[in-house]
Image (cartoon, helix red, strand yellow):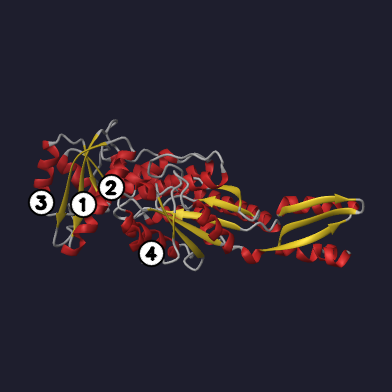
Amino acid sequence: MLDVRERPQFVERAFLVGLYQEKYEEPEGHSLLLELGELVKTLGIDIVGQALVRVPRLHSRYLVGTGKLEELLDRAAEVEADCIVFDNELSPAQQRNLESASKRCVVDRQEVILDIFARRAQTREAKLQVNLARMEWSLPRLKRAWTHLGRQGGRGGATRGEGEQQIELDRRIVRKRISQMREELTQVRKHRATQRKERERTPVPNAAIVGYTNAGKSSLLRSLTHADILVADKLFATLDTATRKVELPNGNPLLLTDTVGFVRNLPHRLIEAFKATLEEAALSEFLIHVIDASQPAAPEYYETTLRVLKELGADQTRIITAWNKIDLVEDRSLLPSLKGLDPECVFISTHSGEGLDELQQRMQDMIANRVVHMDLAIPHERADLISTIHDHGKILEQRYEYDGVRLTASIPKRFEKRFTPFKRNGVE
């Protein structure tokens, strides 16, 4: 990948800047700046100062006026910041202008999130998705890498210098790589579709865990399935989907998928790049929406996830709302107010296990019409049917007799006709 950003080798001290235009936007601005700080710290960078500034309008050159810019640069210099991070999106020109004026590295929220994703990606698919998003982001910024090249003037300015020629060559290289990555992602989606068809042939219902980053999605999957899933108190700790089978209280199996976390103001190009991952949510029978109840901005996190789900076309999918980390909520009297967002929600703690039984019962109710309970008498020569039950259902009771096996089983409704001839009442 071309190195199109000439940033310092080490960035250790960041000064954060958030801008808002209307007075009513100030509380959300504070919340977003706090979240930006968590994102930056995820990269191992210390926060040495921050400023939330109200501006009547956003300026095209520096995003803020020259007077306010001078004030911000003075504050960044006082705390010896080597990087200024804007919560607002910067155009390539604004980024260049701000770096020229400040003599410091200047980035925005989009670039921070892209860097986090680049570090967290593990599988080939995730790395491919991240590289595509970074390439698309970098394309309009390519000329920054070639400012050291000279320009040769010609008559009437018709002759382009070597700098411009290199830029065009570089852009063609990047566009070609973007095209290649999109083709590879197309193949990834085809592979996923094949895997999904295989799952549909074995009619085990499936659900997806969605929610804000660091809300406890991976912890929930680990608690319900006892699987060895990475769990860390970090934003975007995992970017790859993980699907595991969970056994519900009545013995029915369920495939449960953990998805990448959401964040406010997630770059649109990342939503596009990660559709192959997030589409698991759109195609699931139901979703478990996990929210960190201990966060003051929990209602905003709730709305953010629903908004992204709508962009993915998953807003019509049935949802179980699960408020997690209630063991960290100091004032439990505040919890009932969260029911105003979803009266049917459940309160859980993946750490203490509180509420997980209720959650599993709700999950069981979601797929109640997918399975049937049958009393069967299976002849010894049809042991293959018993194997089918083990693979796709659950045997609740079983005893061996001279003429066959008597059992009570929970079976996917799709298989009901196959077992109807062996219903106990029809055999005896």
Comes first in the chain, label 3 or label 2 = 2
Q: Residue at x 35, y 62 (%)?
A: 336
Kindly identify which residue carries mark 4.
339
**Which sits in the foreground, 171 or 56?**
56
Residue 21 is situated, as x and y percent measured from the top left of the image, at 17, 61
Q: Please name the amino acid that badge 3 sits on.
A: Lys
Quadrant occupied by the C terminus: bottom right
The alpha-carbon separation of the residues under discs 2 and 4 comes to 28 Å
Report the side of 4 relative to 356 (left or right): left
Q: Residue at x 25, y 48 (%)?
A: 34
Q: Please name the amino acid that badge 4 sits on.
A: Lys
Comes first in the chain, label 4 or label 3 = 3
The alpha-carbon separation of the residues under discs 1 and 3 comes to 12 Å
Considering every residue shown, the one lying at the far top of the view is 9
Residue 178 is situated, as x and y percent measured from the top left of the image, at 46, 49
Q: Does dot 2 land on a helix, a strand or a loop?
A: helix
Decide: few, some or many residues near mark 1? Use Cα within 10 Å; few <14, some 14-19, many ≥20.
many
Residue 425 is situated, as x and y percent measured from the top left of the image, at 84, 66
